[in-house]
Image (cartoon, grey):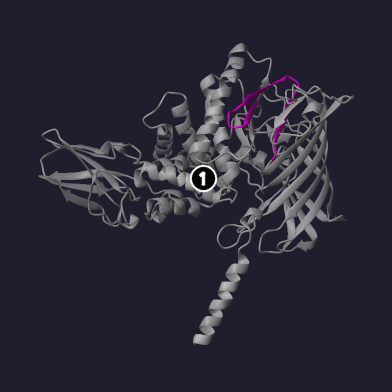
Amino acid sequence: MKKFYFLGLLLATLTACNSTKDVANNVVTKETYWQQHVDYTMDIDVDVNKYQYKGKQTLVYTNNSPDNLNKVFYHLYFNAFQPGSQMDVRSLNIQDPDRRVRDRISKLSPDEIGYIKVNTLKQNGVAVSHETVGTILEVKLNEPIKSGESVTLEMDFDAQVPVQIRRSGRNSKEGIALSMAQWYPKLAEYDFQGWHTPPYIAREFQGVWGDFDVTIHIDKNYTIGGSGYIQNPQEVGHGYEDATKELNLPEGDKLTWHFKAPEVHDFMWAADPEYIHDTFKMDNGIDLHFLYKKNLEEKYLKSWKELQPQTAELMKYYSENVGQYPYKQYSVIQGGDGGMEYAMSTLVTGKRSYGSLFGVTAHEMAHTWFQFLLASNESLHPWMDEGFTSYISNKAVSEISKKPKANPHAGSYRSYRSIVDKNMEESLSTHADRFNTNRAYSTASYSKGNLFLSQLEYVIGADNVAKGLKKYFTDFSFKHPTPNDIKRTMEKVSDLDLGWYLNEWTQTTHTIDYGVKSVDNKTITLERIGKMPMPMDVEVTYVDGSKEEFNIPLEMMRGSKPTKATVLKDWGWAYPTYSFDVSKSVKSITIDKSGLMADVNLKNNVFEVK
């Protein structure tokens, strides 16, 4: 028996050693996650009159997975903007359609639709079989891409920019000529769960990290902003050039713009002939770019100027409270249909009050940390992106605007309670595309996702949440973390068990409702009315006017948060009531005076002894 035991141990040790590769190469198995890698080289020629462009794409795809791949998939997002697409039909049938979409796709004419048509595709120089199915290009490879190998995929494609409806498009409501998001054939993500190829219906995105080298030929009167660093500033001008050097503008009707974006999972650009381009240089070497139309009303132009130093404050706040921004520039660009985050940049509409412009910029910039650097799967877990982004941006706006709020997340609590009252809530575990209503999706993703962290301050303490958020970023940036990763991170910093919290809050629609059942002399009895258990913070006011605070841990937490309150015996979740004794006559009792617990019935949280 001993011989077989030691032989097994030796084999297991060798396997473990061989399975762990260099994390810097994004190849990971046991200790961390492996990541696929892409290198895009794209050259596109734009006809600004027809809103069409021709593209060439060379993609080097490295398979860092343990699997051999016999097929690959690309997203062709622009194909969603055609009558009869799944995005169109979904909007026509959902109970509460997005006001920006409604029935607009169904009414598009052939010269207004969007499309990406793949003309040729080669694998290592040999033509490969492919089929376009809605917004997905299905590719059957000639030879499998073996684990650890790379393949070169070369493509020619034609595309047409749709009328601006959702996120990307031409001639937006505010007159932006080209908002170019989701504009190129984008390789789908392959991870430990397999391929992720949902049809595009205007929800969320996921991508593979890599390096982008993008060349754009466009009318010389257009200014471009977006992802990546400009490589030829003296050849394009438009505010990118070094003022100490001579411009070298080429002859002809078009300029060639060359950008490189390292270690990102998307590339966005916008172009307009009336853009102003301002640069705000931060002390830490990061350049902030602002592109907005020069013919905006004076009040809006003033807001765009005021925005610039406060965007620098946002950059500093997020870097200090989540993790250091790793790039050397960030761009805020007028475009799109509201606000949407992209690699090293965002598109926001520009005709807003200053408070609204600052707020949307704060939110979209915060996405950089959660959608682009951590990059959890937005389709499967939108709450990990939208919710966490809302959490940190609410705190940033409250602090930077010099208008601190007792609870900067109060709006999320109201939204959550409202959807519960209307019996419209759906579980956070629902796929982003599959919510019954847009309201259920947005409340789950933004509001309840936000409350995951703000309520966690109540459960484990605000300092632990702050430490946990930084550790989460440090441990999981560039790794596409899962819900278990944020749970385990918070467990490690708090030394508390949080499996119950992740399950109840994200995988069920159980609600929290606690109340005071009775006060008998000096014995207080609390009751759990809702299905979701929680630890209890209770403040007792005595008849003599003094107050005393108590903390009742939840038994399955296996401990209690840091607190100055008197810690009582823990409460097992299956018991519907809990009693404890106090030393003096009671006047009133308050459950959770912080207001951070998302109790759905606040009326029974205060009890007056009569």
Front-most of 279 and 128?
279
| Residue 387 shows in this picture | no
Asked if residue 354 is positioned above or below residue 13 in the image, the reply reads above
The magenta stretch is 267-289
Instruction: Name the image quarter holding residue 259.
Output: top right
Front-most of 484 and 35?
35
Tell me residue 180's x, y (percent).
Answer: 72, 33
Tell me residue 128's x, y (percent).
Answer: 83, 56
Total marks shown come to: 1
Front-most of 519 and 552?
552
Q: Is residue 423 left or right of residue 79?
A: left
From the image, give the main secondary structure of the stretch colored magenta.
strand
| Residue 576 shows in this picture | yes
Which residue is tagged 1?
384
Tell me residue 424's x, y (percent).
Answer: 45, 41
Which residue is at the far front?
244
Q: Is residue 79 left or right of residue 91?
A: right
Asked if residue 123 is positioned above or below residue 95 in the image, the reply reads below
As helix, strand or loop, the secondary structure at mark 1 comes to: helix
User: Neighbour class for label 1 at 10 Å: few (<14), some, many (≥20)?
Assistant: many
Tell me residue 408's x, y (percent).
Answer: 41, 31
Residue 6: say if magenta: no
The quarter in which the C terminus is drawn is top left
Q: Kindly identify the residue that appears in the image at 68 percent across and 42 percent down.
A: 266
Asked if residue 194 is positioned above or below residue 258 in the image, the reply reads below
Q: Is residue 423 left or right of residue 143?
A: left
Which residue is at the far right?
252
Q: Is residue 266 left or right of residue 245?
A: left
Q: Amino acid at mark 1?
A: Met
Q: Kindly identify the residue that appears in the image at 29 percent across and 40 percent down.
A: 592
Which residue is at the far top?
298
